[in-house]
Amino acid sequence: MEKTRKSKDSDPMAAALRLLGRRDRSTAELTRDLHNRGYDEERTAAVIERCRELGYLNDRRFAEERARAMLRDGRGVGRRIELDLQRRGIEVERARDAIDKAQHEQPPEQVARNLLARRLPEFEYHQADDREKRRVMAFFQRRGFSLDLILAILRETDSTAP
């Protein structure tokens, strides 16, 4: 069943370039976005292939940049990044390779320390009550940090530590 919604552009390549100009996308995202704009499968496939040939569309590059950005911004590590990449149409192995590369460049321990310093500069583990500790630990767990890593980083905040 063909969509009848009129696209802003009659040229799917122009639409693809405009979408890619806003931000990098995975092949699956660009395909979905072009379909949502009413372009048929044949025209979309041709545009996707042309974007790959021109180097505008590269899932490996997209996955690596997305993983680095999520780590840098403290939005996630490990499995959290993997799930985000899979939702964007990146294969599991490619996602894991991108995460490994990004975490080699910026280890999760350093990401957690930076995030703690930026978001909770006054936090001291041994002075916080149980409710505050749980809240801070949940903050890190939602971003995919392991419990062992969270506890190690939080315990470093104790000002009485040697």
Image (cartoon, rainbow, N blue to C red):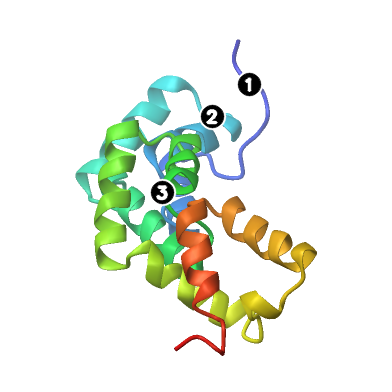
Labels 1 and 2 touching (C-beta < 8 A): yes
Of residues 115 and 8, the one nearer the viewer is 115
Tell me where residue 65 appears, x and y as whole percent: 35, 58
Left or right: 154 in relation to 108: right
Three-letter code, disc 1: Lys
Q: CA distance from mark 1 to mark 2?
A: 8 Å
For marks 1 and 2 on the same chain, the one whose residue lies earlier in the sequence: 1
Instruction: State how far apart marks 3 and 1 are (Cα).
Output: 38 Å
Gap between marks 2 and 3 measured at Cα: 31 Å
Task: Give the residue at mark 1.
Answer: 3
Q: How many marks?
A: 3
Per the image, label 2 sits on a secondary structure element best described as: helix
Give me the disc on residue 42: none
- Residue located at (68% from left, 29% from top): 5
Q: Is residue 63 left or right of residue 40?
A: left
**Crowding near pointer 1: few (<14 within 10 Å), some, many (20+)?**
few
Q: Secondary structure at mark 1?
A: loop
Residue 51 in sight: no
Q: Secondary structure at mark 3?
A: helix
Q: Please report whichever mark, 3 or 1, sits nearer to the chain's N-terminal start.
A: 1
Q: Nearer the viewer, residue 15 or 131?
A: 131
For marks 2 and 3, the one nearer the N-term is: 2
Residue at point 47% right, 75% down?
113
> Which residue was labeled with disc 2?
35
Is 41 on the left or on the right of 136, as rendered? left
The three-letter amino acid code for the residue at tag 2 is His
Which residue is disc 3 drawn over? 78
Q: Residues within 10 Å of mark 2 (few under 14, many from 20)?
A: some
Amino acid type, label 3: Gly
Q: Residue at x 22, y 49 (%)?
A: 54
